[in-house]
Amino acid sequence: MNWIGVKAIYLHEMDRMRRTIIQSILSPVISTSLYFVVFGSAIGSRIPLIEDVSYGSFIVPGLMMLVLLTQSLSNAASGIFFPKFLGTINEIYAAPLSSWEIVMGFVGAATSKSIILGIDFRYRECFCRNFHSSSLGDDPYACSNSTDF
């Protein structure tokens, strides 16, 4: 296993994320924020609580999965297909890497990007969601360790 080659692909993809921060991080942040505003505020204020769960709390898991699955797929696909379109895929083919090692580098970077987005999404969700005191109890860290989001 050529760990240096896998690390090189991983670091190259993470550097590409840093260079395209608007596409990689800012775009999903803005789109989910708009979903929160439109569905959470505009529609959610008209829907009553159902079994002590607000509409905003109900849509959070769905929005989180929507963003993470969409961005995971697009980050991995763009990382693999852009070198083909740019003609730099030959550099990867010429490297002494197996196909498994190439995929491992690209998928590892896409997974890291998705984890970053998930942490960001969870951070924003904690500050945007209307918490009820009964669901938080006396735990001051309930936002970071609650499982009922």
Image (cartoon, rainbow, N blue to C red):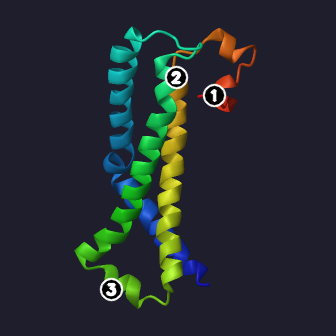
Residue under the point 48% across and 74% down: 103
Q: What x and y, as percent, mark residue 146?
A: 67, 28
* Residue marked by disc 2: 57
Quick check: marks 2 and 3 in contact, CB under 8 Å?
no
Which is more N-terminal, label 3 or label 2?
2
Q: Quadrant of residue 37?
A: top left
Is residue 134 left or right of 32 when viewed as pictured? right
Name the residue type under label 1: Asp
Residue under the point 53% across and 80% down: 100
Name the residue type under label 2: Ser
Q: What kind of element bears circle 1?
A: loop
Q: What x and y, as percent, mark residue 102?
A: 48, 78
* Residue marked by disc 3: 90
> How far, Cα to Cα, is label 3 from label 1?
47 Å
Quick check: marks 1 and 2 in contact, CB under 8 Å?
yes
Residue under the point 40% across and 90% down: 94
Look at the picture and state if 132 lies above or below 88: above
Q: Which quadrant: the N terminus? A: bottom right
Q: Nearer the viewer, mark 2 or mark 3?
A: 2
> Could you say which is closer to the camera, residue 52 or residue 95?
52
Which is more N-terminal, label 1 or label 3?
3
Residue projecting furthest to the right: 138
Residue 148: numbered disc? 1
Q: Nearer the viewer, mark 3 or mark 1?
A: 1
> Could you say which is closer to the camera, residue 52 or residue 129?
52
